[in-house]
Image (cartoon, grey):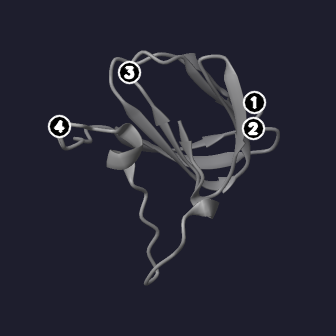
């Protein structure tokens, strides 16, 4: 799932990414973050396809890239948030460069 930051209105200098609603957590449970990393991806160092047992979130800071999730690709750019479910095949490639944050 991708949440397009450009579609979220800014209110009081804040953009709220409603992850709980996007994930449809019927039980209202919280989402715990135990991983946080800033990354830069270029053509020379693409983020190769991987799978993780944990949920991950990618937030695009700068640049543009192509994200592929379970064989479906989309272009992402600044302020976009990508939600990766556990054991989902995912990768990220950039024609130039992209700076992003991975957390989960």
Residues under labels 3 and 1: Cα distance?
27 Å
Q: Quick one: label 3 or label 1, which is nearer the N terminus?
A: 1
At horizontal 33% and vertical 24% (from top left) the residue drawn is 54
Give the numbered dot on residue 27.
4
Residues under labels 1 and 4: Cα distance?
43 Å
Image quarter hosting the C terminus: top left
Q: Which residue is mark 3?
A: 86
Q: Quick one: label 2 or label 1, which is nearer the N terminus?
A: 1
- Residue farthest front in this picture: 26
Q: Quick one: label 3 or label 2, which is nearer the N terminus?
A: 3
3 or 1: mark nearer the eye = 3
Give the numbered dot on residue 94.
2
Q: Which residue is mark 1?
A: 44
Q: Secondary structure at mark 4?
A: loop
3 or 2: mark nearer the eye = 3
Q: Nearer the viewer, residue 104 or 3?
A: 3
Q: Secondary structure at mark 2?
A: loop
Residue 41 falls in image quadrant: top right
At horizontal 55% and vertical 64% (from top left) the residue drawn is 8
Q: Quick one: label 4 or label 2, which is nearer the N terminus?
A: 4
Residues under labels 2 and 1: Cα distance?
9 Å
All told, the count of numbered labels is 4
């Amino acid at each position: 799932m991708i949440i397009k930051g450009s579609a979220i209105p800014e209110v009081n200098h804040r953009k709220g990414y409603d992850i709980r609603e996007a994930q449809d957590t019927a039980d209202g449970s919280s989402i715990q973050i135990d991983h946080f990393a800033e990354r830069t991806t270029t053509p020379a160092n693409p983020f190769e396809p991987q799978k993780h047992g944990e949920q991950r979130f990618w937030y695009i800071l700068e640049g543009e890239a192509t994200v592929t999730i379970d064989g479906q690709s989309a272009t992402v750019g600044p302020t976009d948030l990508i939600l990766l479910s556990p054991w989902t095949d995912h990768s990220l490639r950039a024609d130039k460069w992209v700076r992003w944050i991975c957390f989960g």
